[in-house]
Amino acid sequence: MSTPTRITHLIDGRPWTGTAERTSPVYNPATGEQTGALDLASAALVGDVVKSAAAAWEGWADASLAKRSGVLFAFRELLNERKEEIAALITAEHGKVLSDALGEVTRGLEVAEFACGIPHLLRGGFSENASTNVDVYSIRQPLGVVAVISPFNFPAMVPMWFIPIAIACGNAVVLKPSEKDPSAALAVAALWKEAGLPDGVMQVVNGDKEAVDALLTHPDVKSVSFVGSTPIAKYVYETGTAHGKRVQALGGAKNHMLVLPDADLDLAADAAVNAGFGSAGERCMAISALVAVEPIADELISKIKDRMGKLVTGDGTRGCDMGPLVTSQHRDKVTSYLDAGVAEGATLVVDGREAEFESDGEGYFLAPTLFDNVKPGMSLYDDEIFGPVLSVVRVHSYDEGLELINSNPYGNGTAIFTNDGGAARKFQRHVQVGMVGVNVPIPVPVSYYSFGGWKNSLFGDTHAHGMEGVHFFTRGKVVTSRWLDPSHGGLNLGFPQND
């Protein structure tokens, strides 16, 4: 076994050279081998980083929109050039297959492309002669130092939901990535310096609860963006807002896919497998509850089972369909729901523990698993399992299915599969969920729309990226002005240029 590689913070544009009092192991989940030793930041180090970011922010906030967009374009090009390298780091520490990891980086890249348009996105309004010789106009200005706390399941994409927009808006960013798979986030963060971003505007501190609490309570951190489980999201929101911060905390999910009797069942079966088992089900937008309106459940389950039999689970570098779960502890937690489901009366149709896995080591594997006859009140239904476990819930009408979805405490994502346009329109109007797919199983919005759920899936009023992201990372200001005498700027016949 090789010696684990040291993984450390990125401070003022370079790796930290200090000595960590505490470290955390990083594993390859396909083999179970420890590959890294991660330095964990103390509260004192977090304070030093925030101080450095605050000092760097002043100059960056004064940079022109032309300068900022130039850095964004350069970053976009660098990320596009290195996306295969970033994807490999994701697979090595998270476990998802390479194609899925590359897709994650590409979706993050789309947000960087959106942020390249920051001169237009920050354009204010102007009203001439709102009163006699009085003009009124609006501007948006950066917040200062902002914190991003990202989860393990999308170690590159989720930070990029926030960071490009925050930087484009003129803020300085302190990122705290997941301690389970930090290397992809660190590699992406290092590209900012190469793109021309001044040192200190983009910093990375690795850590656990101590680092998180230090960011949530530091007076110079003006906002916090978080993605993770609902209990932690609620804690982040309550702690951050109690310390005067603007907070967007995206929590957990229990996403339903409602299949009506008129739906194309082959399309629905493909979608259920893709959305239920992609990334080993470790997606906040994964479909975990398939709501089948009778009499189609038996036929649909048969089609899903047939497709599941063709999937290969194993090392994400081998061209398998699904990789391992991120840690052994998480794998064991997910598998505990299988015995619980049987004990509570659900029917175990496909048991993922019985599969063979394509891997050389003792990885953290669980193959796709399917349950039937799942009902509210069962842990399979009530809990966010965050693994490759798909539960089929049978209902007898559209109205029963809609009520089931709306009564769930989560409201992140949902989908309806039908060929009835009226039913689809009615569903998108009345379902109490933040992101809705019509014959689309994973309705993650494109970058110029915003990502976020309802109910216990979001704490705070602002969703990620899109124009809501721009508004989150800026403050509005309205200026009322009167100039009694015209000014004269002198003669200059040259063509005006942005600078």
Image (cartoon, rainbow, N blue to C red):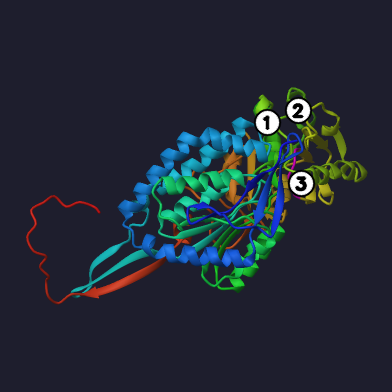
* Viewer-nearest residue: 171 or 428: 171
Measured from the top left, where is residue 359 in percent x and y? 76, 28
Measured from the top left, where is residue 177 in percent x and y? 61, 52
CA gap between label 1 and label 3 equals 21 Å
| Viewer-side label of 3, 2 | 2
Residue 413 appears in the figure = yes
CA gap between label 3 and label 2 equals 24 Å
Which quadrant is the N terminus positioned in? Answer: top right
In the visual, does 213 lie left or right of 169? right
Give the mark nearest the N terminus, 1 or 3.
Answer: 1
Q: Secondary structure at mark 1?
A: helix
* Viewer-nearest residue: 464 or 499: 499
**What residue range appears in magenta?**
384-388
Amino acid on which disc 2 is placed: Ser
Q: Which residue is mark 3?
A: 385
Q: Which numbered tag is attached to residue 316?
A: 1
Q: Which numbered tag is attached to residue 413?
A: none
